[in-house]
Image: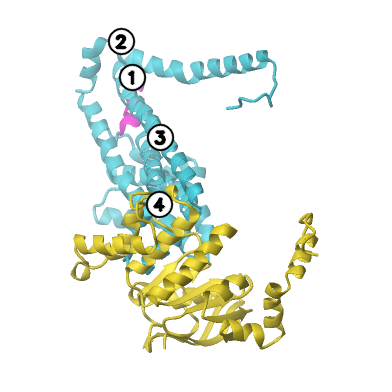
Chain colours: A cyan, B yellow
């Protein structure tokens, strides 16, 4: 917020910029969101709620929840481990590791999906072995979970690495000299220091895991009632002209996304406050 | 004997941080490790604490070998330059930390913890501050909390890494006098690292002058000042005896010299 007169643009410029931003946001964000809820509620609240009784819809919600419930804890755990490794220790190949972590972000989700087909599909590297042992990964729930794990992996590590680097090792070393064990140091010293950044990473992981379409679509094979997550099922419903149900599921996903954004904003504020108090201390 | 350091070597990559260091640190005294920055003094302190592992050599406390002991088993109190207080804990919790993390069998009960913390709070003169958080304290107060926290575990050795380095000049002087008086009360074997000659002379009983990973001289403040062992020591300690030289240096560095008292 610039209150002083350093920037002395004419008022017209400000008005024009505001107008442009307003139009852009309305057309690309607010309008679509309103449409989703309007379409979903076209048949009234009763009709809206009825959409969720449909077994396909109910299944897609359950599968998405299951995926999130597996991916978020797993990626949180590995994200913390990774951030801990690259910020507290020195080892050869560290820079490479930090770069490799970003791969899921730079690779197209479709490629990520194909990668799992190449690995675990019937003609893939482990395909024969998996078929022999009667294990289904591709076109089954494990494939969905693996693809989601892959695309939502970097968030926690990416959020924590700069934060933990900034915090340094002093607190942990102090706890060590005071006789704390590794676990005690993590729970009583490190975790309280990184909790806001960690939550932020978890929220982002959750958002991505819930909304992922591309990678999951490739490994899913769209077996209805087996591998259809919420985003996939919305696509199926829409393709079959079942607009009411499609928009009902879409509205639920959008609602969750909005909640995510609100939580994220609150966390950003909390992190800013923590950074500020950190500055005072150092 | 307090701390015995024998043939300690430490390299970081190709950089020789410490080269064959051997020294005995007297029990119950304050010893200063004095030297220019990058001379290896902090590395030596961290090796004594167990926060770094030497490439070779032996560390003993009161004759007992510590070289292969883990940090948490060495019973050292360590005070960091930037305090390293736990920012989500108040003063009381910070000081109590070392007692609370003990295994259940040797952990004091609530009342005992409360008593020891309050005793330390009184020792570092922070009565009335126990509920404050680190962000609500001044630099000098934070460093006193850090000291109390280190003393809470009743360490056999107290190690201080540039303990006054982050403080402004006035507080620094007050705090080092205070530390000297405090040590006269508690007599724990203490080693502190500094690059400030005045600080070393004022606070310590013994000064160990370190340069480029080697010990140049060790002795009482009087001994090293009056009988420097070599040109480096003479030059390094000369700054305190020749204030005019210091002043000239400052002028060269670009500080505007507008008071005439010095020259």
A10 relative to B130 in the view: left or right: right
Q: Residues within 10 Å of mark 1 (few under 14, many from 20)?
A: many
Q: Chain of mark 3?
A: A
B91 relative to A69 in the view: left or right: right
The range drawn in magenta is A229-239
Q: Residues within 10 Å of mark 3 (few under 14, many from 20)?
A: some
Looking at the image, how many numbered discs can be counted on the residues? Answer: 4
A58 relative to B166 in the view: left or right: left
N-term mark: 3 or 2: 2
Residue at the outermost top position: A43
Between disc 1 and disc 3, the foreground one is 3
Q: Residue at x 25, y 27 (%)?
A: A57
Query: Do marks 3 and 2 both belong to one polypeptide chain?
Result: yes
Between disc 3 and disc 2, the foreground one is 3
Label 1 belongs to which residue? A247
Question: Is there CB contact under 8 Å for labels 1 and 2?
Answer: yes
Label 2 belongs to which residue? A42
Q: Quadrant of residue B240?
A: bottom right
Residue A67 location, x and y as percent? 29, 41
- Along the viewing direction, whichever of A22 and A248 lies nearer the viewer: A22
Query: Do marks 3 and 4 both belong to one polypeptide chain?
Result: no
Q: Residue at x 21, y 71 (%)?
A: B106
């Amino acid at each position: 917020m610039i209150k002083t007169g350093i920037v002395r643009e004419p008022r017209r410029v400000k008005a024009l910029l505001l107008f442009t931003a307003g139009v852009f946001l309305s057309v690309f964000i607010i309008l679509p969101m309103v449409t989703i809820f309007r379409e979903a509620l076209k048949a009234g609240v009763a009709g809206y709620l009825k959409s969720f009784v449909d077994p396909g819809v109910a299944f897609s919600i359950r599968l998405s929840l299951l995926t999130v419930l597996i991916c978020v804890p797993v990626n949180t755990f590995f994200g913390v481990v990774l951030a801990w490794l690259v910020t507290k220790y020195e080892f050869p190949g560290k820079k490479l590791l930090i770069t490799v972590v970003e791969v899921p972000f730079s690779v197209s989700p479709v490629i990520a999906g194909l990668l799992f087909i190449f690995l675990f599909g019937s003609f893939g590297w482990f395909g024969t072995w998996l078929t022999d042992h009667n294990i289904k990964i591709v076109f089954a729930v494990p494939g969905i979970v693996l693809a989601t794990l892959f695309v939502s992996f970097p968030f926690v590590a990416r959020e924590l690495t700069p934060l933990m680097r900034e915090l340094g090792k002093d607190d942990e070393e102090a706890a060590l000299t005071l006789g704390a064990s590794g676990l005690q140091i993590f729970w009583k010293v490190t975790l309280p220091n990184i909790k806001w950044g960690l939550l932020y990473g978890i929220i982002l992981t959750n958002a991505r895991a819930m909304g992922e379409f591309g990678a999951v679509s490739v490994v899913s094979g769209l077996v209805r009632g087996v591998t259809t997550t919420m985003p996939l099922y919305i696509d199926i419903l829409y393709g079959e002209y079942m607009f009411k149900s499609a928009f009902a599921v879409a509205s639920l996903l959008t609602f969750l996304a909005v909640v995510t954004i609100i939580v994220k904003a609150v966390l950003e504020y909390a992190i800013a406050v923590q950074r500020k108090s950190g500055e005072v201390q150092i | 004997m307090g701390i015995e350091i024998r043939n300690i070597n430490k390299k970081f990559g190709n950089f020789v941080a410490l080269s064959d260091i051997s020294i005995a640190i007297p029990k119950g005294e304050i010893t200063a490790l004095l030297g220019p920055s990058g001379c290896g003094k902090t590395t030596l302190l961290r090796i004594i604490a167990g926060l770094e592992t030497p490439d070779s050599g032996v560390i003993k406390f009161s004759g007992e070998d510590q070289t292969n002991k883990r940090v948490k088993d060495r019973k050292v109190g360590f005070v960091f330059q930037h305090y390293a207080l736990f920012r989500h804990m108040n003063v009381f919790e910070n000081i109590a930390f070392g007692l609370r993390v003990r295994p259940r069998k040797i952990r004091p009960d609530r009342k005992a913890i409360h008593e020891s913390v309050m005793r330390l709070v009184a020792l570092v003169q922070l009565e009335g501050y126990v509920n404050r958080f680190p962000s609500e304290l001044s630099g000098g107060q934070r460093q006193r909390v850090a000291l109390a926290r280190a003393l809470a575990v009743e360490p056999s050795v107290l190690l201080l890494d540039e303990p006054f380095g982050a403080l402004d000049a006035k507080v620094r002087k007050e705090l080092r006098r205070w530390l000297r008086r405090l040590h006269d009360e508690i007599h724990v074997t203490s080693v502190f690292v500094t690059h400030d000659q005045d600080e070393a002379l004022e606070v310590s009983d013994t000064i160990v002058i370190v340069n480029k990973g080697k010990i140049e001289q060790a002795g009482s403040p009087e001994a090293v000042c009056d009988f420097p062992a070599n040109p480096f020591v003479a030059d390094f300690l000369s700054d305190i005896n020749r204030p005019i030289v210091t002043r000239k240096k400052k002028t060269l560095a670009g500080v505007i010299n507008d008071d005439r008292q010095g020259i």
